[in-house]
Image (spheres, rainbow, N blue to C red):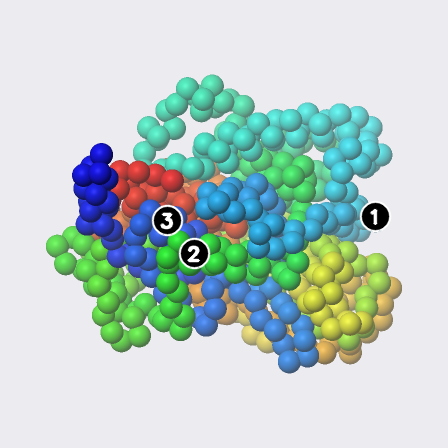
Amino acid sequence: MRLTTRYAHTKKLKMKKKIAIIGSGFSGLSAAAYAAKAGNEVHVFEKHDQPGGRARQFTTPQGFVFDMGPSWYWMPDIMDKFFADFGYKTADFFDLISLDPQFEMIFADKKMNVPENFEALKLLFEKTEKGAGVQLEKFMRSAKFKYEVGMQDFVQKPCYSWLEFVSLKIAKSALKLDLLTNFRSYVARYFKNKQLRTLMEFPVIFLGASPKNIPALYSLMNYGGYALGTHYPRGGFYQLVLAMKNVAEKQGAAFHFNNTVEKINTENNKVTSLQINGSNQEFDAVIASSDYHHTESLLNEAQRNYTDTYWQKRTFAPSSLIFYLGINQIIPDLKHHTLFFENDLDEHIDCIYEKKKWPENPLFYCCCPSKTDDGVAPKGKENLFLLMPLAMGINDDETLREKYLKEMLARIEKHTGINDLLSKIEYQRSYCVSDFIADYNAYGGNAYGLANVLNQTAVLKPKIKNKKLDNLFYTGQLTVPGPGVPPSIISGKIVANEINKIYYETAI
């Protein structure tokens, strides 16, 4: 027995691999933790001075603390599962607050507060449309099934081949998953009221396409949000970034900031080294959490999975115009999350995907975390994060940004009764298409990755493994399973497991 144990230990040491991870967004953090747990020597290289990618955070001289990207903490069970895989609980790292109301949606003639309690949500639906409370219960029952099958089975596959989905469970579930029905038609089966339909369609906007082009499978988003609740980590969404980095470091992963990967060097169908800040460093395998298209630009053209023409034909999720604003007084009647949907959803979406221009009558989202967290703004002041979805690749000069800022502020003023918000701005920073390109090498300045339309689902997404280089893998929102924080965390686990299977014949 003693000899066998010593032999197994020696064998594992011989198999230990030196792995580089490019980028420390959620998929990179996840991949780092799982790859290091398997016994690999893991090094994460990040061009910025902090982890998180789009989920970075910054603090202003005035004392405002801004999350730069994600602000909707949905599908909490996915984050809980990540921490549980390493023997932790979410509560070991941060205080997670359940928001009530989850958010407020502003229409032209009314407003809706989405309550934390599902029974209260059913009453809201029933009050809006007779019979809609029962319909919501039916909708959520089906959405829960999709969530359980989708998030536990469907999105956990590496998606090399459709054969991965040939299982009894998925086969039995095929019709119930509604893959061939579009989301808009699906919602219309349950609700007639236009505002209720908009409320139900809103979550799939995170998936980067019109509800009429998204498979009804993604009603699972409604369950992951409305039924499981909308949460907020005290201290900001960045607390999740710090917690995941902490977990990865406890497994042995090392992080290197202000380190830009400039070239991927190859020989004999393998990556041999990365050129980082002008110097070459050798690795046994590489996981790219960086923008997929950008990563491939670091290779010779013949070694890339996809051509520029391929990327040009993909349907991308939108870019965004974002404003980070420090306001020098309290704003009344504003919730933590508010959706300003007074204008037509389809008109705005058409400007993003068809006309590719700035919208004339935009929708936008306002996050005011200082309503929940007194640590993100000085006392008596507010932290505002404004986001307007926008077409990729369009001109985003300061004049245009300012024009839309004034419109968004005017609509907040109308909703809250406050006057002249522009004069009350103590801190202001904007972020748009060109910033996504400069900071993240984001293709076309996209903010969320590839849209989850049917012809870009599962096996039809860009592959997680390079087809010509045996030890180069890809993770993140441009590959499986898709855009969003929970899918990115799952993506990191999938790619780490693929490496672990190759080198260890095990998966976590």
State the image coordinates of residue 296 (x, y, percent, origin top left).
30, 58
Left or right: where does residue 324 sit relative to residue 263? Answer: right
Q: Position of residue 294 (x, y in %)?
A: 35, 61
Which element is circle 1 on? Answer: loop
The answer to which of marks 3 and 1 sits earlier in the sequence is 3
Which of disc 2 and disc 3 is earlier in sequence?
3
Q: Quadrant of the C terminus?
A: top left
Q: Secondary structure at mark 2?
A: helix
Look at 70% across and 38% down and name the residue there.
Answer: 197
Residue drawn at 59 percent across, 44 percent down:
76
Residue that sits furthest to the right in the current view: 417
356 vs 45, left or right, is right
- Picture quarter containing residue 307? bottom left
Disc 3 to disc 2, how far (Cα)?
9 Å
Secondary element at tag 3: helix
Q: Are marks 3 and 1 in contact (CB under 8 Å)?
A: no
The residue wearing badge 1 is 110
Check disc 1 and give the amino acid type.
Answer: Lys
Q: Earlier in the sequence, mark 2 or mark 1?
A: 1
Tag in front: 3 or 1: 3
Would you name the residue on which mark 3 appears? 37
Q: Is residue 443 above or below residue 80?
A: below
Q: Is residue 201 visible?
A: no
Outermost residue on the front side: it is 2
Q: Which residue is mark 2?
A: 250
The N terminus: image quadrant: top left
Question: Toward the viewer: 333 or 59?
Answer: 59
